Amino acid sequence: MPRKLILLMVLLHSVALTRATDVQVWLTRGDQVSLLEHRPNLTFQAGQGTHATRAHLTPGTTYQTMVGFGAAVTDSSAWLIQNRLNAAQRATLLAQLFSPQSGIGLSYLQVPIGASDFALTAYTYDDRPAGQTDPNLAYFSIAHDQTYIIPTLQQARALNPALQLFAAPWSPPAWMKTSQSLYGGSLVSSRHSVYAQYFVRFLQAYAAAGLPIHALAAQNEPLNDSTALPSAGMSTAQQSTFIGHYLGPALAAAGLNTRILCYDHNWDQPDYALTVLGDADARPYTAGTAFHGYGGDVSAQTTVHDAFPDKDIYFTEISGGDWATSFPDNLVWYLHNIVIGAPRNWAKTAIFWNIALDENDGPYLPGGCNGCRGVVTINSTSGNVAFEVEYYALAHASKFVQPGAVRTASESYDGTLETVAYRNPDGTEVVLALNPGDASLWFDVVRNGQYFAYRLPPKSVATFVWPRIVPTGDFDGDGDVDFSDFTALVGTVAASPLTNGGFEDGATGNISAGVPGWGVWGSSGWHHDDAGRVIGTKAIKFWWDDAGVWQDVPVVAGNSYAYRVLALNSTLDPLVGWNGLLKAEFYNSVLGTDSAHRLGEAVVDKFYAATDPRDQWVTLAGAVTAPATADIGRIVLQITDYQSGAHGSLNLDSASVVAAQPGCLTAPDVPGEAGCLAAFDFDGDNDIDLRDIATFQINFTGTP
């Protein structure tokens, strides 16, 4: 075998953890002997495991960023919490549901826009007597929600400030519909505009109450126009038109960054989502697809994701009920399909239906679901609370997987050992494991040359949690030591930051007030310290192409220079319809730095909002050569390429312009590469090649 191939295999070999790592274990058994019980800790040990069933983890391979896990605060749920519990009972239950410390940390809730079938009365926010209309929304009011729904949500958010909301309507106001009723029918096309404003008013009213809506669906279950409960049919053509021509533009004009999701119905009709996402007018405004789990297979989510990988997947509704009462069977079904299955098929959320119902499975409207089960059951007389199987299924994810966690690669075997893995923003790692079988199962979890073994009882689930592991030599922070760490080290040694290249200096605020070290133009930019959207303490962001920042550095004509900046498209305010721009310009100091005397310019790299990942720092970089007579190089950062319906913002950080050092990795076996050789000739043979990477690995990890 060629020596370089052997060395490359050595390079890619898993790296041992640098110290023993304790693993927390939380267990729920199908026989209910353990219910979210904290079991004795395990410890990683060297090796690849000894059991036939093994789940190998690859923490450096990442997928979607999670938004949260939760349930629906329906009218019925909120009414029970506020009216059938005393203050002490209510405080205890809300802490058990929402506190990340003492409870299960639910972080994503559905809020019906008006009545669902789980309400005390059928209502919207602009109900008028029969025969009357309100095209100016003069009678719009969320007063109904202010009595018990909004207080419940506010109390939940006080316990978990990371909590976010998803909203969907069951029906428009009756006067907007073909049926002139909340039951059945569809939206009259002439009411599209006023209905879009109805959404705007709802979003603004909830935001004013301290409850911004993260995402919404244009219509709950648009293929269900039942006359037995509040509902409205909405065809793919109507939804495409409504989103593309009315709802999307209305939200953009109002400055609202709430994400619009299409479909919001069962897995069995993915073509609905594919049609809306494929519509040229609707697509720019549509952030993704919402799914329910009452029909079809969870793999439909992957079908839609693969067709439109730049669009997100949300799972937004499933309910248990008296049609399925076996605790172990329900536990397995929920983990297989929802808590493990939905994220493994790209869902960023997993939401159950009613967060609370009473002992009679209500309150619910006549014609609504008779027999649905809540996540918890509240006894309407005593206020005692029973925690249902849905609570434990959710808890195994919600208590441990933080908002902003990234799903990472894990081996999973349907029907034998089913897993899903995450890395939290704080670096902790989480693995959920389900044994759906009828017998106990021994298995190994294997990570980078270390493993732990566990015996999982039948029809049971365990969550494993361990602290951040950073092997020595993990320069790119992905949990592995591999080729990318060598290249990360190259970048670290070669980097020569600009003045305030990380934007750490100076006060936050509009860039028009000035950013130390940078020239600025326009006011559609912000020097900010938004948590989760900075490297260090501050970054810069833009939301329109009439603003940007620039900085000049000395260059030598004919030399090459590496331009670099990191870009983050956060789902908290996603960039849509723009692209990020890293640009180089060159000038001569004698002639001047005005545009008339520009000696050359080049687009170094772009961030493409439609295809580049969200919630990950993406490197924009490239090398350019200074033209003849140039002695000033300018780095320019902005957004560009406006498209219809553009909105959102792009975060930029860690900018640098350095003398390019080609040959370090691209030209192996070439001796004497200036600058590179001194830093990266790890094996001392006077060149830079794969042997240096292998030596680097041995030096920093001890791996032979």
Image (cartoon, helix red, strand yellow):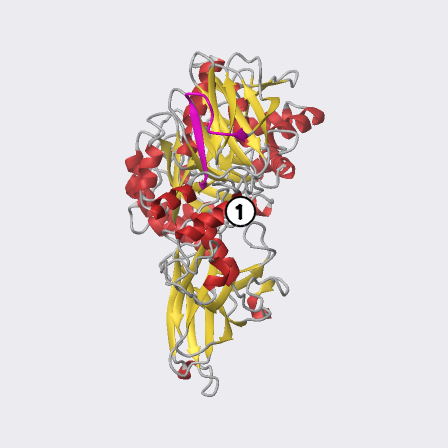
Q: Nearer the viewer, residue 514 or 322?
A: 514
Say which residue appears at 45% left-offset and 54% top-offset: 487
Return the residue nearer the eye: 685 or 494.
Answer: 685
- Name the quarter where the N terminus is drawn: top left
Q: Residue furthest bottom?
A: 590
Disc 1 residue type? Phe
Residue 685 x, y percent position in the rendering: 43, 57
x, y percentage for residue 68?
Answer: 51, 37
Above or below residue 552? Residue 249 is above
Around disc 1, counting alpha carbons within 10 Å, would you say few (fewer than 14), some (14 to 19), or many (20 or more)? few
Q: Is residue 595 magenta?
A: no
Expressed as whole percent of the image width and height from the top left, the position of residue 296 reads: 32, 26
Q: Secondary structure at mark 1?
A: helix
Q: Is residue 154 above or below residue 672?
A: above
Kindly tell me whether residue 295 is visible in this rendering. Answer: yes
Furthest residue in direction front, as rendered = 685
Residue at 36% over, 51% down? 611
**Label 1, on which residue?**
700
Which residue sits at x=58%, y=71%? 517
Residue 307 to residue 418: above or below: below
**Region rendered in magenta:** 45-60
Q: Is residue 394 left or right of residue 295?
A: right
The x and y percentages for residue 337 are 41, 26
